Amino acid sequence: MDRRASERGTAIVEFLGVTLLIVAALMMLMQMALWIWARNVTVNAADEGARAAAEMGRPLADGAARTRSVLHDGLGGRAARFAIGAEQDGDAVVVRVSGVAPHIVPFLPEFVVSAEARALDEDTVVRP
């Protein structure tokens, strides 16, 4: 048996092996990008909610609603699974957001995303 006959088909096997590794690396890269996106949306939503709740004459519920709206705009239907809390902390309004980031690779562990934002409540500012 000559050498050419014994190596028949090795190029296909090598191509498939390399292709699988590249696809797995790309999937992991996309998953990491999705996690970073979810974190950035969560931080932005908490910040927007805190600023909305801190405006003069607006209740804390407005801040929570604004947070939910920004989350929904950034994450779609998955935003419904995020917990949102808004509370008064002295002269500041605090908005906390926490939830699980969406994932595209099913066997990876869940990535919990949380953010907290504070803003000075304009209703508590004393004017001279």
Image (tube, rainbow, N blue to C red):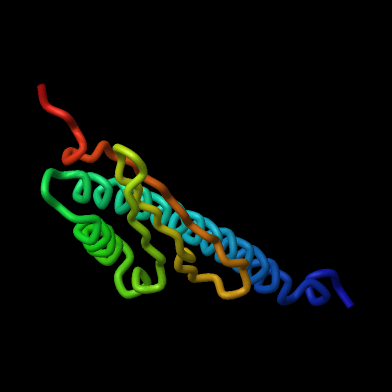
Residue 4 image point, x, y percent: 78, 71
Residue lying at 37% horizontally and 62% vertically, measured from the top left: 84
Front-most of 60 and 38? 60
Front-most of 89 and 21? 89
Quadrant housing the N terminus: bottom right
Residue 126 image point, x, y percent: 16, 29
Quadrant housing the C terminus: top left
Residue lying at 15% horizontally and 44% vertically, measured from the top left: 55
- Of all residues, the one furthest to the right in this rendering is 1
Residue lying at 41% horizontally and 72% vertically, measured from the top left: 81
Horizontally, is 112 left or right of 1 in the view?
Answer: left
Above or below — where is 125 with respect to 25? Answer: above
Front-most of 53 and 13? 53
Locate residue 15: give its quadrant: bottom right
Locate residue 97: give its quadrant: bottom left
Q: How many marks?
A: 0
Residue 90 image point, x, y percent: 34, 40
Residue lying at 35% horizontally and 73% vertically, measured from the top left: 80
Horizontally, is 37 left or right of 11 in the view?
Answer: left
Above or below — where is 126 with respect to 94? Answer: above
Residue 106 image point, x, y percent: 57, 75
Front-most of 40 and 104? 40
Locate residue 73: give its quadrant: bottom left
